[in-house]
Each structure stands twice: as C-alpha cells, then as structure tokens.
Image (tube, helix red, strand yellow):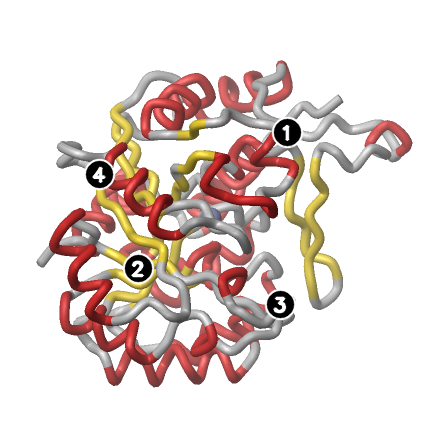
Amino acid sequence: MTTNWTIREIDARIVRDRLQGWLPERVFDAHAHLYRVCDLGSKAGEFARSGPEIAGYGEWRARMTELLGPREFAGFFFPMPSATVDVAAANSFLAGELAGRKDCRRAMLASPSTSAAEIASAVAEFGFRGIKGYHLLCPQQPAMQAPIADYLTEEHFAAAHELGLVVVLHMVKDRALADPANSGDIRRLCVRHPRMKLLLAHAGRCFNPLHAEEGMVALDGLRNVWFDSSAVCESASLEIVLRRFGPERLLYGSDFPVAFQRGRCVAVGDGFIWLTGDWHDWKRMIGAPEPSLVGVESLLALQRAMDARGFGNAEKELIFGGNAEQLFAD
Ligand SMILES: [Zn+2]
C-alpha cells in the first residue's frame, strides 16, 4: 500500500514540533508543478497516476495548507514533465489555473524544438515569466547524460535574455553541477545572456553535497544565478549554497507534487538514491524507521542549513519570499 499523498502521524508530528513555529507566515514556493495526469501521456509514472487526476492551483494550495498549516502561500509554477507530455496542453492548463493570480508566477515547458518565436508568443499570450526545459523531452532517450544544450538550446537562452525570463534548469549527468561540462556551460550562458536569470533546480541538482562542494566554485561571481531548495534532503548541500552565495540566492521550493512522495533522497558515495515509500523493505531496516514525506525532509534540511549559518528571521524572509521578488523584478 502506498502512503504517498497522505499525511501520516510521523509527518504531522515533525511539522508540529519542528516546523510550524519556524516557518514564516508568508511562504513563496519557488518550485511547484501543476498538471493534469491526462496531459502526461503514457509515461506519466506511477507516482503521478496514484495522486489526483487534476493537480491544479487549488490542489497545491490545499495540500500545502494541510501539511504546513494555514499560511499565505504563493508560488512559481511550471508544468510537470514526462517523456510523453503534451507540451501545449500542459502550458495552457497551467496558464488557466493561474489566470488572475497576481501573487504567483508561471514558467512554460519548452521542448528542444520550441522556437524563440513560440516562446515570445506564449509569453505575450499567457504571461509566462520563465522557461523550463527537461531532459525527458530530448528526442534521444535515455538522456540522463545529456549536455544542457540538448534540452535548453542557445535559442532558448537568447530568448530568455531578450525577454528577461527566468530559465529553470534541472540539469542531468551523474555528477550534476560537479561535472565541468555543466558548470562550464552555466558560466558561459550566464555571461553571454546577462538579462536571463538562471534558477538552478534542486540546488543545482546537488542531492549529494560532494557535488555542491566541487561544483559551486565554478559559479563564483555570477550575478544572474539562483538556487531552489526543492527536494534536497541533505542539509550540507544547502549550507554550501548559503555559504558561497549568501541568503539572497536561495529560494524555498516544495517540488509539489514530489513533496508528497514518502521517503528521502540520500547521498551515497559519489551519487544519490531515492528511498521512496514504495521501497518496501523499511520494516526490515534496523529500528524499522517510518519514513516521512520528501516535503518534510527537505524543509528540515533547509532549517538545519540556515541554523548552521546562524540565520534568523531576516534571512528566512528572503528565502521564503524576498528573493523571489528580486528574481521576478523587472
Ligand atoms: Zn520539480
């Protein structure tokens, strides 16, 4: 039996004891997906299929409120990717969900073949403030070792520079940001397109702190790069972002719906593994631990990273909202 998508006693207890009083009243979630399962196609994935058929703005808000308690929630949303997603349908669903929501921002999904003209017209029609590319949309699969240019093209970055858009990058390759091909591309793209704002999802996909330690140095001095904390469960990765770039460059993200997946992403050796709730051997582990939700684990990691830096309310305001305002300032 899957326990994804439900809030269990373990989640409620950790949130109540550790997070409720710590979280600010206003929470801007800078990484959340809104989608309809029907738009994801045949490769929708078990987790999405086991949740709501329509995961729109209302669903996101209700779930976040249920997990973290009533607060003023807003966010930066993009469609959910899958190898078979109907990109146009997913983008227009997202735009419809957020119509009139001035407190929220939206990014469009772009496939490698999306042209600059298509981006400009979608921005004009739907008010997108960003682009999200994804390796799953590469024609050649699997694309886990793809260079950035295979899923976010030079044309995409040039359009983002032209229109002042945020590019949300979920990079791949085994060592993520620690791969010099990725960090070199990022530096070159940020310098060449200074009006483009690069938001590195999952702290540069540094699910392993080794990758943060080795990779982030290559981005020193760049003025148009930000990180989101989404789904990162190792506090050391987030602490490295805070140490190198300060509290002004990290944004909280839930990675909804991933926040409602049970388990944790754990650094192992030079990589990481997802211990998810459907990994059925928890009971055979020493002490039979009961896993919590990714959304809870990643908030604990963010809290620990901020505590380790000695950060208080001022930095909290930045990470949970102020930095997003800066990111989307014209
Ligand atoms: Zn995501």
Q: Residues within 10 Å of mark 2 (few under 14, many from 20)?
A: many
* Amino acid identity at mark 3: Gln
Q: CA distance from mark 4 to mark 2?
A: 15 Å
> Of the residues under marks 1 and 3, which one precedes in the sequence?
3
* Amino acid identity at mark 1: Ser
Camera-side residue: 131 or 196?
131
Camera-near label (1 vs 3) is 3
Q: Position of residue 49 (x, y in %)?
A: 59, 32
**Mark 1 C-beta to ligand 1 under 8 Å:** no
Are circles 2 and 3 on residues that touch, CB within 8 Å? no
> Of the residues under marks 2 and 1, which one precedes in the sequence?
2
Residue 278 shown left or right of residue 86 in the figure: right
* Amino acid identity at mark 2: Ile
* Amino acid identity at mark 4: Cys
Q: CA distance from mark 2 to mark 1?
A: 31 Å
Q: Locate the N terminus and report the quarter of the image it occupies.
A: top right
Q: Which residue is mark 4?
A: 104
> Of the residues under marks 1 and 4, which one precedes in the sequence?
4
Q: CA distance from mark 1 to mark 3?
A: 32 Å
Res. 292 mark:
1
Local secondary structure at mark 3: loop
Res. 131 mark:
2
Answer above or below: position of 49 versus 201. Answer: above
